[in-house]
Structure formats: structure tokens, C-alpha cells
Image (cartoon, coloured by chain):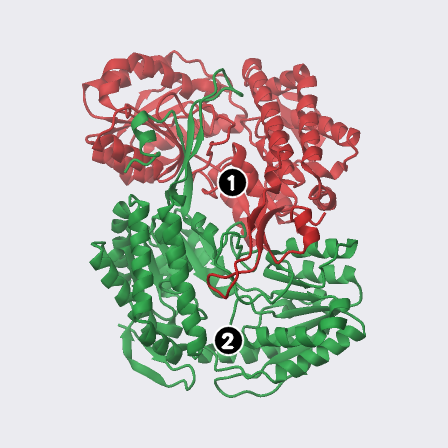
Chain colours: A green, B red
Amino acid sequence: MKTLQSLMARSGEPLGAPLWASTSEQIDACAHAAGEAFVDWSCSNGAARAALLRGLADALESDRTDLVALADQETGLGTARLNGELDRTAFQLRRFAGLAERGAPFDVLDDPAVAGGPPAGHPAMVRQRVPLGPVAMFSASNFPFAFSVLGGDTASALAAGCPVVVKAHNGHLLLSNRVMDLVQKVLKAQGLPAGLVGMVQGSGKDVGVRLIRHPAIAAGAFTGSTRGGAALQAEANARPRPIPFYGELGSTNPVVALPALLASKGAELAATLAGSIGMGCGQFCTSPGLIVLIDGPESDGFVQLLSTALAAQNPHAMLTPGMRQAFDAGVEHMLSAGASPLLREAGTTEAPRPFLAQVDAASFIARSALREEVFGPSSLVVRASTLAQVLQVLQAVGGSLTVTLWGADDESSDTRALVRGAMAIAGRVLFSGVPTGVAVTAAQQHGGPWPSSTQPMTTSVGDASMDRFLRPVALQDAPAWLLARGGRPC
Amino acid sequence: MKTLQSLMARSGEPLGAPLWASTSEQIDACAHAAGEAFVDWSCSNGAARAALLRGLADALESDRTDLVALADQETGLGTARLNGELDRTAFQLRRFAGLAERGAPFDVLDDPAVAGGPPAGHPAMVRQRVPLGPVAMFSASNFPFAFSVLGGDTASALAAGCPVVVKAHNGHLLLSNRVMDLVQKVLKAQGLPAGLVGMVQGSGKDVGVRLIRHPAIAAGAFTGSTRGGAALQAEANARPRPIPFYGELGSTNPVVALPALLASKGAELAATLAGSIGMGCGQFCTSPGLIVLIDGPESDGFVQLLSTALAAQNPHAMLTPGMRQAFDAGVEHMLSAGASPLLREAGTTEAPRPFLAQVDAASFIARSALREEVFGPSSLVVRASTLAQVLQVLQAVGGSLTVTLWGADDESSDTRALVRGAMAIAGRVLFSGVPTGVAVTAAQQHGGPWPSSTQPMTTSVGDASMDRFLRPVALQDAPAWLLARGGRPC
């Protein structure tokens, strides 16, 4: 049997005793138990789902001090941030509790019979939704609470009526196990089966592949790199019975800043942007990795201000040694593709220094290597000569979780074109502030065209994320007893 | 350059002069023109979309006599059916006109700002949808109007704001070209670009592959075989930028008939079912290819009645010689997998005779060859010994557009279990009547788990089919001018 070792992010030193990696038999048993749990959980009512989700939120909060301390050791993200993330995680568990309680997963579209032959006449139809089945949930490195064991994917899947098998992230193994212990206590206290939320762990890709290919698994949910997500999606598609796979992948999150606004608010915006690039050591899927400017003195000045503000940032240790190495490799890759460094300093073995580079729009459009995400406190300034070229830059990006437009407050043909260009490639378009920080709310859309997600019509944050796990079923001429039950046979 | 030849379905003889297959340059030009048309069409308002869709419906109807005559020659489906199908096609064009006119593609979810910090506080968010871009639409063989040039995929894509490039089906090339001429006249009359609805044609897979891989294409819509759909989906996923691919594929559409109902209404149901199996020579995606019965005298009697009723059916010629040959091969395949023939007669070169076979549930569950769709007037009776075994049979089917349950009118633990089992694998569950005939209405769900469709969360028939071509975008802190335009920058 293989073992796994948790490491302290700030020192790279081992933390705690080694853990066993899940064996193939354990993975299979976990998926099977989720399948068994699905039988009853798919029939649970909103009150039962709400009770579980609230119980899980309460459990997280009751163990807050120890959880945050452990998470801080494993991830180095700092207790302030981690406390906020735990708040968010509890908030979204309770938000989905409310959705389930108010009956959102059980919504019915009633379409009464219309007399006469087709096409206008039709039988009585009722559109209902059914939960997909057990969800294989792949935890993220960078959100040890909010996109991990009890994160948004788990909350939305449970609210939809689906069991979850978590693939723990190796970057916070002890935390994942501790949260899983809490989960099991809550399940037991509520008389629910242990298999309703299971967990597997392991290094390499074997564990994840075995999980996503297990016949009992009905969907995949993933937050991580484009490469990892694409590989798992290919496995989901290669099953004898392909299943939906929801991957939230890489994103460069362009910020377009127009000269007029830079002229009046350049210093403030530079400070804001530098803070967003450096925050959490840049380890956010919405980290602004691309700054698109139009040539001119305002942009020149802004680049100078930004470079200075960024130099004043002190990024903390990265989540794992592998990510720290990947950051340096990403920077090298970008420079060898032709970007000119504006700010480049050696960091420590654990913590990088912020990196800023610059390139002209034509090169950016021509070279795909410049368009790859560098995970960490890095950003690339792209200098365009015209608004038309800005639009070409956005088109070259092709897909992003967000685009931020600074200076589009007034209507003009330019700002209209810019908004169109942004909406064409992003799931979320911001008109002020920075893309980091994703509101858990009704209208959120966290997911955009490839490579930012595998299913751009869906979101992994916000109320609509539950829709990923509910499949529509039309009931034709349903009998009275079934209609009286809201189209639910159980 | 390659040529194509239309054939008369009833004789296999050539119809008309050969046609040129689209060259690579023509395919590229078509996709490019659709991309150019997208710029304005994505900005069109509901009135413009409604005017186009209604103009297309009117054009179809104004040329009805000649279109139906031509379709009848090429497909052999008969003028009664083809007139009805033309009615349906015009109906759905007008239905999507109404949806566009009432603003369905422009729906906005307003989520006002909540004061305070996260997680409860959040900025103002507005959720809007944007059309994906040009859709590559692969026509079906079996619906020369309703799933072809001006079929449901085209109607829903145009209503959503997306141009369409049609891949004409080789089974009705002359009809496709004639309909395309009408389309071009309508586009011209309304001052719309020719590229808004384009068409390519060719044999083999090269034309379709080149189309789905073209950078200007933003989504695929397909109705046809599991094999063809899976191949095109793989191409869509293998693009540098993967795109959504909506495939409506093969389906066996189980009909479960419980003994009590068979005892009282067996003769009537046998006649109804035989009619559904034989209708249109069985060339429907919803043709009932599987009849699941519980052992006993009622089921024995029903099988006898069904066999007799089916023997009285006179299926017409199949759509193409290739399908006629595939039918015989499918029957052979099923027999070699262990099914016992109940009704098997030699047909003509063009028209098969209805085929009925029987197998025990255990064999059906064990052998995947028995679960494959045989396209044509064929059905397989599966004999189960218990209700539990019926549920196992449904589980083995795994995915189907429909499941029909006869005899579930009263609530019991058996009927509840049966409805659950049916909803777990199907997009539509019927409680009376037959699955052939798919209502174009608000609550329709035409699409289920694999292999019945590639995206089981979506439908290719009914109002929700438009959602396939609209991607959500959240606008954060949108400026007043953009909100005043309903979140649409153009």
C-alpha cells in the first residue's frame, strides 16, 4: 500500500504521520456505498436536505479554531483568509439548505393538455427533475474549505439529491480528513448512511481515474488545472456510458483599463490591481493574469504605478512545492515566448516574488504560449494600439471566467463593442473592482468558454450550480397519484 | 470534385442530376459567412427573429405541394405523414418566433447589491445570456422537414441569435436544396445576409468533420446514430477549443406493460403498439424497440396478439438502401446474440417486414448486443419473472429517450418503484399511448442519458431546446446605460 505525507506549506517539512492512499478496493467500495446511499437520498425531501446541510455548516463552525489552524499549516494561506473562507463555506451550505427547503430541486413545470391533434394539440406534460446520482468531486488546492470536502460542489450536489465521493487534494490532506470526520459524525447523528459523503485520497492520477470511471458514479465536478481537468474529462467521456463532467479550469481573467479612467484614477486602480494580483499569492482561479491597455501616456504611467505597487506586495508561501516550481517554470515559459519583464525578483524556496511582464498585442495574438495561465502572483501587460486591437486580444484569449472593464461607465460605440467582446468570452463581466472574490448569489456565473470550463453553460458558484446535478424528465399523461406527489414517485 | 446522387427511396433509382459535393473551400466559406452573419444576428431583437422564423414557416407552407412530393420521392415516407411533418415544422418555427418575440432569449435575472462584506454582502449582479455563435447542424435522415434544414435545431438556434450551417442529409438532398433556395429568398427579402443560414453537402465523414472543426463554429447539433454522433462529438472535443455538442442518438424506448392492464386491454394495446412499431417503417428515434413483460398468461396472450397485429402491418420502403441493409444486419445481430424470433419474414429490397423477437431478462441483462437499437420496424420482447427483474432490465438499458409504463395508474410500492426506475434512465416517461409522436411544447424533454443523447441535461425538442445555444453571463456592477438596454450592449 502507498502512503501520503502532508507537508507544511511555509517550510515544506512533513506534518503529522503518513496517511494511507486509498486502494482500488477502497475506491470501489466508496463509489458503491454512494450508489447505495443514492437510493434513499434521491428521495429525501427539502427539509432533510436542509437539515444535513445546516448540520454540516454548524459542524464546520464548531471546529473552526482547529480547522483553521490546521488549514493554515497545510496551505499557508493565513488565518484571516481561512476564517473568511470557512464563513463562506458555511454560508453556501446554508444557502443551498434554503434552496432545498424552498423546493428548488423539486420545481415542476406544468404544461396541461391541449385538445386536438398535433402539432398544436398535445397530451398533459409535467417537467420535473431527477438527481443524477453519485458525484465524484475533485477538491481544489487553493480553497481548502470552499472548494474542498464541504465546498460548493458538495453543497450543491447534496441539495440536488446526489451523494458525493470526494477526491481529497494532496495539498491539505489532514484538513480533509478532519473535515471528513466531522461529516461522518453529522451523518451518524442524523441517521444517514456513511456512504452519502465518502472520500478517497492518493497521489498520481490513478485514484481519480478509477473514481471517475466507476459505474456507480454519475457525474464529475472538478476545480483545478486545464491539463488535469481535460484528462479527467477524457476519462469521463471514455466510459462505456459517458457522464457529465463539470470542470472549472484555467483562466487568465483579462482586465481592460481605458486611458481616460487611468488618467483620473490610475494610482488607486494600480494599488487595487496589485492587491488582487498578490492576494493569496495569486492562487485564485480569478486572479487577474492579463492587463490590456491602449498605448499612450496614461497607460505608460499606469504600468509604472502598477509595477511599483506590485513590488510592495509580499506574497506568502505557495500551497505546495510543486506549485512553487511550476510558477518559476511558467515565468520562464512566458519570457521565452517573448514577454519583457517589468518586475522580476528571486523569491524564496516557498514564496515567489510578484512577477509582471509586458508584450505587444500582435505578439500576444500570435503566440499561444503567452496566453497560458501562470498560477501565482503573475500578470502580463498587453499593449494594444487601438480599441480594435483590444478586441482582437480578447478574442485570442477565447475563454475566461471573467473579464474586467475599467472605464466603460459611459455609453459609446467603443464601450458597447468592448462589452460585447467581453461577454463573448467570459462567464462574468465586471465594471468595477477586481475579479478575485466570487459572490455566492443567485445571478453568479462562474464558468466560461474553454479553457476556463468544460461546460460553459453551467456555473460552479451560485444558486444555478445545483442545476448541474439535476436532469429534466417530462412526465406524459402522469397518473393522479404521481401528480399529487409533485411528480416524485418516492 | 465529388458528386452526389439523390435516389428514390421506393425504387433505389436515381432522381435528378448529380449534385456537387461541397469542397473544403466551400465549407470554410460557409462557416466563415456564418461567423460574419453572427455579428449582427446576435444583436437582433425579438421582432427581427420572429419575422425571420415566420417568414421561413410561410415559405415552407407556400411551397408545400412540391416540397412534399419531392420529399416523398426521396424518403418514401408518404404524403400524409410528410404533410403532417411540414405542419409541425412550420408550427415550431412559429413557436420559436413567439418565444423570441416575448423576449425569452433576453431574460434577465436581477440580483441587486446587498450591503456588507462577503459572504452575505455582494455587488449588484445581473444574469443575462449570450448566443454561442454559428451552429453546425447535422440533419436527420428520418425527419426531412422537422429535423432538417428548417427543423427544430435551426429554429431554436436562430431564435437564440445563432446562425446555422446545415449539413444536408444524403437521404433527401434535392429537398434540402429546394428548402435552402426558399431560405435564401426569405433572407434576401428581409435584408439578411445569405450566410445566416448556410448549407454544405457531401458523402463520407469528411464534410461533417471539417465543418465541426472550423474555428467559426461555436456548437454542434446532431440527430442520428450513436456511432455517428459519438464520432462528431469526439471531433468537437478534439478542437483546440472544444465546443458544446448536442447529439440526439440511439434509443430503444422500453415499453413496460403490467399483467393486470394486459388482462383487460391486451388486444387494444397490442394493436396500438404494433402500429407504433410499424409506423414510418419504424424509423423514429422514439420507436418502441423493447417490450418488457412479466411472465404469466396475460403476457403470453399479449405477445401472441402483438405478433399477429404486427404481422398485419405493411411497412413502406426504408429511407435509404443502406438503412435497409442495416436493418437486416441488426436483426441477424440480435438473433446471433440469442434472441428467439417470434415474427420474421423476408421483405423486399426496399421494404422490410416487421420483426419481433423474444429473450429472457437474464440474457438481456448479460448481453449488450441485445440492447442495441435496430433502426426499423423491429422490437424485442424481454420476459422478466418479477418486477425486480423489470427494474434490472431498465437499469441495463441505462439511457433512453423514453420509457412507457402501461398499468401504473394506481399507486403502489410496485408502481412507485417502476416510475423511479423509468425516470432514472429516460428523458420522458409516458403513462399512456406510445412514445412515437413528440409534442413541441413547453415541458417537453427529448434527450436522456447515454446512449440516447450526448448532453442529457438538454432537450432537442420543445421550448427548452433554445437554451442549448444561450450561454449565461453575469454582469457585475453594470453601468446604468447597459442595464437600460437589458444587459445587451448592442
Q: Nearer the viewer, residue B9 or A481?
A: A481
Q: Nearer the viewer, mark 1 or mark 2?
A: 2
Relative depth, front residue between A188 and A65: A65
Q: Is residue B247 above or below residue B405?
A: below
Left or right of B474, for residue B254: left
Residue B56 placement: quadrant: top right
Residue drawn 28% across the image and 55% down it: A196
Residue B369 image point, x, y percent: 35, 37
Q: CA distance from mark 1 to mark 2?
A: 42 Å
* In the rendered image, the vertical position of residue A72 relative to residue A286, given as above or below: below
The amino acid sitting under disc 1 is Gly
- Left or right, B359 with reference to B129: left
Residue B438 is marked as none
User: Where does the image place residue A423, in percent across and percent down from the top left?
Assistant: 64, 54
Chain ID at mark 1: B
Q: Chain of mark 2?
A: A
Q: Judge left or right: residue A453 versus residue A8.
A: right
* Label 1 sits on residue: B247
Give percent across and percent down for residue A335: 65, 78
